[in-house]
Amino acid sequence: MSEPWREISRRKQDERKSRIPPEWRIQSASIPNNGSMLDVPRTCGLLTSRELSITESHSAVSLLAALVERKYTSLEVATAFCKRAAIAQQCCNCLTEVMFEDAMARAKWLDEEFARRGKPVGLLHGLPISLKDSFKAKGYDSTVGLAALAFKPAKENSTLVDILLEAGAVLYVKTNTPQAMMALDSHNNVFGRTLNPRNPHVTAGGSSGGEGALIAMRGSILGVGTDVGGSIRIPAMCNGVYGIKPSFSRIPFIGQESGGPPGMGGLGLKASAGPMATNLRDCELFLRVVSDSGPWERDPSVVFGEWRSQGTFPAKSLVGVLRSDGNTRPHPPVAKVLEETVQALKTSGVEVVEIDAMKSGFQKCNALANKFFTIEGGNNWLSLLESTKERLSPWLSTRVVGKRPMMRTETLLSLHAAKEQLEAEMLSIWRDENGRRLDAIICPVAPHVTPEVDRWGGMGYTSAFVMLDYPAGTLPIRDISPSDLSLGFSHSETPLNNKFDQGNRELWDGKGIDRKVYLESTLCVQVVVARLQERKLVGAMGVVEQALKKGGKKGDVAVASEKAAKL
């Protein structure tokens, strides 16, 4: 029986390969068979010392400053990142659309305009920015891992793409996702599986997994992902990078490909677009530039509010710590790094109070959020699979049994009524027992360390903040150490008798688990603030990061440029 998806996949992969110049291809012997690929860009011999400096020694903020000061041309910066992205692709299969030729032409034009006008073209002049595959770029596909959407190039850009171009950015690659962006491991039948460049045995996460892997390889230093359940924050954790999910009405989302039917976004949980980067200041740069571009004039779902109006994290602050979602006990290293963060904050003078998941109502969030993912029954994207006789990816094949009837209007109304009630109830999480207002919350990104491929568990620690529409970010703290591997669950903790907690414990204590597989992965915390306060979130994440540095706990983080405020 013919399976059209196979030929489509072959053609798409051939197309992608043809867009990487032959002289940028590396010997397979340069790629480790069984370990970290992070050193390959330095050791493969493809990048010059100047290109290594451009791609490794700079944040987006400092690179912009160098471009404005004409230390680099836009063309040489674009060339360096295109070459490094090509290396990343050959190592971990993170790209979908390769736009090198157009990127070079644009960079050359930016250099010519700079010379003609005597000033840069926009606040992002010459800065290479990568995009998740769901963003539409004119002339390129947005397959989101579905063969049926291949070879159907976009006729116009997503609104956010236009905003970035108008600000002077150079868009040069799109990055891999799971099938229909419906999984937490970035595998699809069109492009294959994205590997985690830190450790190919553990997952790169999803659905912005290609973006996370590319940034970990520094084939990009600033990219854009999307998040409707954890799809920015989860791959940020898996790949040890920074990722921020704003409130849904902050960054333009119009013009996305989702594989779902038009209008579906208004019925379910609302997805957000947000930055993923090698450091916090670059996330701030993205949010500030987009917010100050007046996006509410171009996307009706975006609320008015320039960057300076989006909250401020106070010098004297009160932070809540949520140690569990009430459904799954965190793995011992996850609990340990959260406690290290709490102690560092206290040492730096920040007051920290405990939040009880049971009393706050947080325990209810995951179950309710999950119901929103079944509204349409998956009928649209499953029909797209059927049209090319495409099979489900491994992660989805264990979780999806087929199409379901679309939710009835009465059921949908009751679901939204329950959401409204829980949103109101959860406002109490921002007050401590004495009625004082919390400025931020810290909690795990997930109850487990980065698991092996196709073994990601639940997303209760991330989907809750989508349902509540709170801005939230992943902050890398440190790599898991050999001593972390010896930690066990506390005997004083009563196991939570549900399938989620049992499955989570099996990832740490289960039969056949060799915890050494978790080495080279990163331990992170999640930082959360109240709705539509993205500037406050960046401030809170900065305070946590600085507290850990002052406490002598060295995380795998980049140093933000002093010039950020001048740009």
Image (spheres, grey):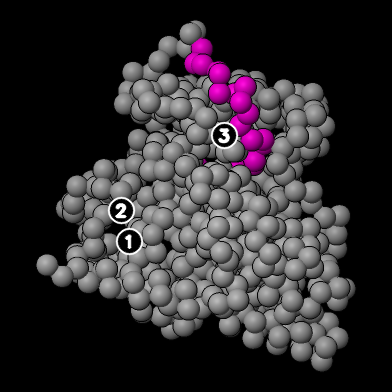
Residue at (66% x, 52% y) in the render = 39
Mark 1 — residue? 189
- Other residues around mark 2 within 10 Å, as few (<14) / some (14–19) / many (≥20): many
Q: Nearer the viewer, residue 388 or 403?
A: 388
Q: Is residue 564 left or right of residue 205?
A: right
Residue mark closest to the camera, 3 vs 1? 3
SS class of the residue under badge 2?
loop
Say what amino acid the circle numbered 1 marks.
Answer: Asn
Say what amino acid the circle numbered 3 marks.
Answer: Leu
Q: Which segment did they paint magenta? A: 464-490
Q: Quadrant of residue 256?
A: bottom left
Residue at (41% x, 43% y) in the render = 453
- Is there a contact, CB below 8 Å, between mark 3 and mark 1? no
Q: Nearer the viewer, residue 193 or 138?
A: 193
SS class of the residue under badge 3?
loop
Mark 3 — residue? 519
2 or 3: tag closer to the N-terminus: 2
Pinpoint residue 132: horizontal percent, then vertical percent.
Answer: 50, 63
Residue at (48% x, 60% y) in the render = 93
1 or 2: tag closer to the N-terminus: 1
CA–CA distance in space, label 1 to label 2? 7 Å
Mark 2 — residue? 393
Pinpoint residue 205: horizontal percent, then vertical percent.
Answer: 47, 47
- Is there a contact, CB below 8 Å, between mark 1 and mark 2? yes
Q: Does residue 440 lie above or below 349 as drawn?
A: below
CA–CA distance in space, label 2 to label 3? 26 Å
Residue mark closest to the camera, 2 vs 3? 3
Residue at (86% x, 86% y) in the render = 118
Is residue 214 something that shows in the picture?
no
Pinpoint residue 127: horizontal percent, then vertical percent.
Answer: 70, 70
Give the number of marks: 3
